[in-house]
Image (cartoon, helix red, strand yellow):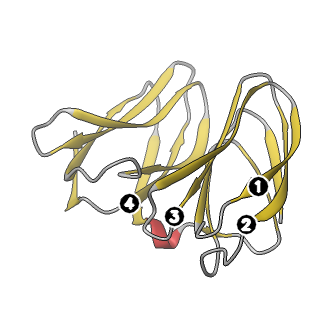
């Protein structure tokens, strides 16, 4: 168990793992109970995931299960990677717009992979607001990014892109 400064604010965890087996990271609430699954992969992992985006829970620690070396960096969601017009990546990530979207806007989302591809829009407070994509395998689609969107979370096993 890794102690972190207690927070009930939406936050991100940047994680890496080098290994062959399961790499699992849980955010634990003040009672020591698992409140959010931050990472769950087999083998090498590099990704950024958010927690405290559904409802605020005071998170005080992270629980790590790994078979090799790993790193974790916990940051406020405001430190998520900047998303201007286009964003590309591989695996899990969290993106931040400069300001909340003023009006609904069509965006194009692509994914090349074999497993789950999930994209959520988050509001200005960093809370889930709308599910934008939830597919298995390759995906290409145009979806409506809601007004008020400030962040997006991506869960993917392959390469992806988002264009505003």
| Pointer 2 residue | 104
| Pointer 1 residue | 144
| Residue 78 horizontal/vertical position (percent) | 48, 73
Which corner quadrant of the image does residue 158 belong to? top right
Q: Is residue 89 left or right of residue 29?
A: right
Q: Which residue is nearer to you in this view: 35 or 4?
A: 35
- Mark seen at residue 134: none
Query: Quick check: 47 above or below 164?
Result: above
Q: What's the CA distance linking mark 1 and mark 2?
A: 6 Å
Which corner quadrant of the image does residue 43 belong to? top right
Q: What's the CA distance linking mark 3 and mark 1?
A: 14 Å
| Pointer 3 residue | 123
| Residue 112 horizontal/vertical position (percent) | 86, 34
Name the front one of labels 3 and 1: 1
Q: Are marks 4 and 2 in contact (CB under 8 Å)?
A: no
Question: What's the residue at 60%, 44% (across, down)?
Answer: 46
Q: What's the CA distance linking mark 4 and mark 2?
A: 23 Å
Query: Quick check: 111 above or below 145?
Result: above
Q: Which residue is nearer to you in this view: 15 or 82?
A: 82
Name the front one of labels 4 and 2: 2
Q: What's the CA distance linking mark 2 and mark 3?
A: 13 Å
Query: Mark 1 vs mark 2: which is more N-terminal?
Result: 2
| Pointer 4 residue | 10
Task: State the quadrant of the N terminus.
Answer: top left
Q: Is residue 106 left or right of residue 80?
A: right
Query: Mark 3 vs mark 1: which is more N-terminal?
Result: 3
SS of the residue at dot 3?
loop
């Amino acid at each position: 168990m890794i102690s972190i400064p207690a927070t009930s604010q939406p936050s991100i965890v940047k994680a890496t793992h080098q290994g062959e087996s399961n790499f699992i990271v849980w955010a634990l609430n003040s009672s020591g109970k698992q409140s959010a699954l931050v990472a769950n992969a087999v083998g090498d992992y590099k990704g950024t995931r958010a927690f405290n985006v559904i409802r605020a829970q005071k998170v005080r620690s992270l629980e790590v299960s790994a078979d090799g070396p790993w790193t974790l960096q916990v940051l406020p969601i405001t430190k998520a990677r900047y998303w201007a017009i286009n964003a590309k990546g591989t695996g899990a990530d969290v993106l931040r717009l400069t300001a909340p979207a003023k009006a609904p806007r069509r965006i194009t989302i692509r994914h090349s992979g074999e497993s789950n591809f999930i994209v959520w829009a988050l509001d200005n407070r960093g809370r889930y607001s709308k599910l934008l994509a939830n597919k298995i395998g390759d995906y290409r689609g145009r979806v409506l990014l809601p007004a008020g969107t400030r962040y997006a979370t991506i869960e993917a096993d392959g390469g992806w892109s988002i264009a505003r």
